[in-house]
Amino acid sequence: MAKKNIALIMSGGFGTRLWPLSRQKMPKPFIKIDGNHSLLSLTYQRVSSLDLFDEIIFVTNQDFFYLTVNEITNIKNKLPTSFVLEPLSKNTSPAIAISSLYVKDKYGSDANLLVLPSDHILDNIPQFRTNIERALELVELNKIVLFGIQPRSPDTGYGYIQNDNEEVLAFKEKPSLDLAKKYIEQGDFLWNSGMFAFKVSQVISEYVLQNKKNYEMYKNVYSNGVRKSIMGYDTIQFDKNQYNTLPSKSIDYDLIENSLSLAIVKGTFDWSDVGSWEEFKKLLDNNKANKFDTHLYDCFDISAYSLEPKRLVCSGLKNMTIIDTGDVLYISHNNSENNLKAIYEDLEKKDNNIIIENNIINRPWGSYKVVHADKSFKVKSIILNPHSEISLQKHSKRSEHWTVVRGCATVLIDGKRFVLKENQSTFISQGSIHKLINEGDDCLEIIEVQCGKYLGEDDIERLDDKYVRFE
């Protein structure tokens, strides 16, 4: 078997520093920065365009499988793609170790892996390709290769790598502000970008050498994984209880900091991990994605972003960030960003729903948004992706009215099949067996009005379903 180069795209974080735009069920990689392209889809397209890799593997939470598939479905010239699906997040080290074992079984121990976060922004792709080519040369010397970024400021959110050309002298993870200033003044430190390249055999040897007990745990979980094809993609899944026994470790602490086989390539491309609102605001400005129509009076340094078109009128404000996601309005002083972590942790205890999800709920077939709700009725805007369908189902406690507002719907009710076009509607009585299908190439949008004594999502009895519902 010819040696393979595999790109491993990591998509498991929640992007807590970008709350309230990033939520646990709709995290940072899936944010549409220009209305059309998410950070994840841009990463996928970037890797596919390099002409260096034989396959792309996503390692992600199983809850994000259909979100990811929907992001890459319409991308042209896709590489072969598979998924390592985690039942819960245990940080980067277990994910990379288990993925390396998966690649070893699939392509052999001499396969090369490039590990990339799914939510970074890169420009100057020719230079990025040149840097990867050099990293792959170093990998052949059994090096674990880091990609370093020239620091732009004494930021405490990054690991710092002391280097002498391609030699790594020291690895310092997220220092204090005073230390970060010292590192920058010293001039021989680079930011750790979170990207790595290595030969599978080398990284496995490092795991065995540095912490054989943890490695045996990773290996045991992997050996009990279940491989199956879902929607045409190879996947491997794991038992949640067994996965939960793994230590939650970053690869930086678990392996990189103590490795004697490190090398570094200084990135000559433009890079941002979009890890703060300050970075994200630049990205939004560059993509003209702000949906506020702002009217500012006697204001200075105001940054605002809204998911929905909305007017913002401000008077006498200075140095403010304003984020509107429909269900949350977040306002902060520009230099108080470091407080967001503490705010996030406090909200997890007091109002966890706004940490977990926003008012747009994703499903394998698309998404829905609750427009209005009362005790006896609920109004939803439902979007079905092209060539998708909801399950064949019925409700015992509610009836539903469907009105098509965009696209063309194929409807099944109690064995009858018919088509609804825009501005046409139908009624589904309580207990009727029904299904909604989008057979077109564009999204279908309907307005659903639910009426009944109970309107919870658990009043769905699925009789037939094309999608795998992960536990």
Image (spheres, grey):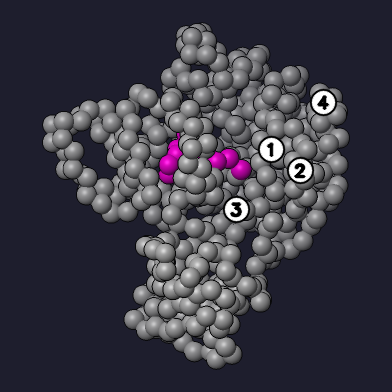
Label disc, if present, on residue 211 of the rendered structure: 4
Residue at 58% x, 40% y: name it. 13
- Identify which amino acid the numbered label 1 is placed on: Lys
Q: Which amino acid does label 2 sit on?
A: Tyr
Magenta segment includes 18: yes
- Please name the residue that numbered disc 1 is placed on: 90
Q: Nearer the viewer, residue 115 or 295?
A: 295
Q: Name the residue under label 3.
A: 64
**First in residue order: circle 2 vs circle 3:** 3
For disc 2, the marked residue is: 243
**Part of the protein shown in magenta:** 12-22
Considering only order in the chain, which callout, 1 or 4, is on the residue closer to the N terminus? 1
The crowding category of the residue bearing disc 2, from other C-alpha atoms within 10 Å (few below 14, some 14 to 19, many at least 20), is: many
Q: What residue type is labelled 4?
A: Asn
Mark 1 residue element: loop
Foreground pick, 338 / 80:
338
Is residue 127 in sight in this rendering?
no
